[in-house]
Amino acid sequence: MNQHPILVQQVVAERHRQIRDGFAGATSRGIGKPRPTRGGRSAVATMYLGLAATVVTTVIPYVDRSGLVRHIRAGYPTYGEARIDKAATIYVVYLSVVGVLGLAGWLCSIRAARAGKRWASGAATAMFLVGTSVALTDLLIKDTSGDTGLPTLLGWVGLLPSLPGLLAVALLWSRRSA
């Protein structure tokens, strides 16, 4: 009989911990899958938007390869077609690798946030900082011709996933502090 109030206290304490950490739906015995609260769902939805933006950003160099070729040709007028094509291919491969790494980062962040991992906010923040740093570097870096390495529009498009990334990070941290 005396154990019942202790069990109730344990269940209530566990429920308070879940609410403090921003999750609803899990029981004290681990039955049921933790579900993100409204703020957590908003963060995950925003992350899916960032994932979609990363897909678009990764595909654009393939769609507008000719713009990349024109940019390289303008910066290096003495280059022959083969050398320009090789430089454009290197850029496309580089941007593809960056895009795939970005997609992996989004998927890991989404999975962590959906599972209610305590480290999701920190990991998402780190990935946001790395991704935004790479995007800013791609936008601003100058090559040996004195022009930016990438066409300006392509550089700005590379920053597109950072917008939902910033919002997702803010939502994840606000959920933790709530």
Image (tube, rainbow, N blue to C red):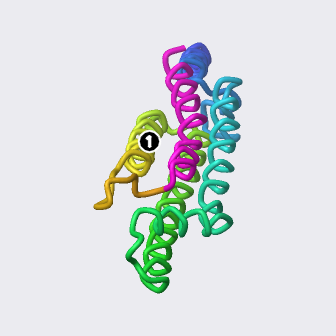
Q: Was residue 54 drawn as part of the magenta stretch in this picture?
A: no
Question: Most extreme residue toward the bottom, as rendered?
Answer: 82
Q: Is residue 5 left or right of residue 73?
A: right
Query: Which residue shows up at 57% across the image and 48% down it?
Result: 153
- Of 2 and 133, which appears nearest the observer? 133
Q: Secondary structure at mark 1?
A: helix
Answer with left or right where residue 63 lies relative to residue 154.
right
The x and y percentages for residue 34 are 65, 36
- Within the image, what quadrant is residue 160 found in? top right
Q: Residue at x 65, y 57 (%)?
A: 55
Q: Quadrant of the N terminus?
A: top right
Q: Which residues are magenta?
A: 151-178
Residue position marked by numbered label 1 in the rendering? 132
Q: Main secondary structure of the magenta part?
A: helix
What amino acid does circle 1 point to?
Thr
Q: Residue at x 50, y 80 (%)?
A: 85
Q: Residue at x 68, y 44 (%)?
A: 48
Give 173 or 55, whichever is nearer the viewer: 55
Asked if residue 16 is positioned above or below residue 77 in the image, the reply reads above
Residue 96: % across, % down = 53, 66
- Image quadrant in which the C terminus is located: top right
Q: Residues within 10 Å of mark 1 (few under 14, many from 20)?
A: many
Residue 171 included in the magenta stretch of the image: yes
Above or below, 86 against 146 in this view is: below
Residue 75 falls in which quadrant of the image?
Answer: bottom left
